[in-house]
Amino acid sequence: MTRQFEMFSAEEGAVAPRARREPPAKRLQPGGMTEDGMVEQLINTGRYRILRKLEPRGVASTIRSEFPLRGVILDTETTGLNHRKDEIIEIGAIAFTFDAAGTIGDLIGVYGGLQQPTVYIPAEITKLTGITDAMVDGKTIDMAALKALVDPADLIIAHNAGFDRPFCEAFSPIFLGKAWACSNAEVDWSARGYEGTKLGYLTGQAGYFHDGHRAIDDCYALLEVLARETANVPRTAFAEIYEASQRARVRVFAENSPFDMKDHLKSRGYRWSDGSDGRPKCWWIEVDDASLDDELHYLRTEVYRWPDADPPVKRLTAFDRFKA
């Protein structure tokens, strides 16, 4: 179980700084070469690519005033994929500061906790996460500790917010009314030279490896990937995601579209809604404001073939996106 909560506050005092130790990379290894020297030698041969173990950032002992905004990176492990019937068995969250330009400041809080579900954990979930029934026996998530991180957050980031947000909002009201962003959907990873969007790919291509599929470890990994500066890209992935969270999106519903157009809609990026939670039962897509006229033109000319067709639209902000 990962169960840790550290949050700086003036009342509770600062987290005690750790004693300074020489980094392992600077220590002499057998043969008189430092670890950094061995790594450089291997890389210079052109035959090796080195991955470093991701070392989590320490919690800051003071909060710098130049980073006034608060973010939380959050990850969940669950008994399944359906937020209406499956349950959270682990939550990891790390809180950090940032500024209006999207520059990440300091790590200011960490929480990781397990929760015993009302059913046995399916074998495939244990295989994926390593979490067993014995590990969660009698465990409950510390809601006070989690609330202390979530309440001040200006933005919650998950790598699959469309999955994590519905589970979190079904789990506790502390997540209601918060702004969310998705580091999978709202970052152009290919423009940054990444070959995939899964967190394991991103971490590996950033030069790290970590213990994946445990909530708190994935949070630490995502923080480093988001904060990493990329050659030929003027801003970090977090700056990109924060800017995206400030823009409104428009959800367009292809209501009453002809059945024989379903493959065309799907190939254009439309998704199917089954009509649950009060949504129209139809195909839908999200676009930015600048693309709305083009999308409506497509529906009127290619799908409905009627110039006066008026498909429903709904404007969304970060407070609405990625909901169930």
Image (cartoon, rainbow, N blue to C red):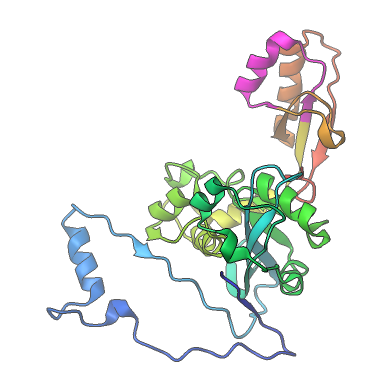
Nearer-the-camera pick, 187 or 169: 169
Answer with left or right where residue 175 lies relative to residue 100. Answer: right
Where is residue 117 shown, x and y percent of the image? 69, 57
Picture residue at 22% right of the left edge, 77% below the top: 34
Q: Residue furthest left?
A: 31
* Label total for image: 0
**Rendered position, 83 above or below 107:** above
Answer with left or right where residue 67 lies relative to residue 276. Answer: left
Where is residue 123 shown, x and y percent of the image? 54, 48
**Rendered position, 239 above or below 304:** below
Nearer-the-camera pick, 14 or 67: 14
Where is residue 107 shown, x and y percent of the image? 59, 73
Which range of residues does the magenta coloring cover? Answer: 252-271
Picture residue at 33% right of the left edge, 60% below the top: 51
Residue 251 can be seen in this image = yes
Nearer-the-camera pick, 56 or 104: 56
**Rendered position, 41 above or below 205:** below
Picture residue at 71% right of the left edge, 89% below the top: 12
Tell me the quarter of the image containing the N terminus. Answer: bottom right
Asked if the stretch drawn in magenta spans residue 161, the answer is: no
Q: Give the quarter of the image for residue 261.
A: top right
Residue 246 can be seen in this image = no
Q: Give the quarter of the image for residue 288.
A: top right
Answer with left or right where residue 214 lies relative to residue 253. Answer: left
Picture residue at 78% right of the left edge, 15% below the top: 257
**Rendered position, 93 above or below 285:** below
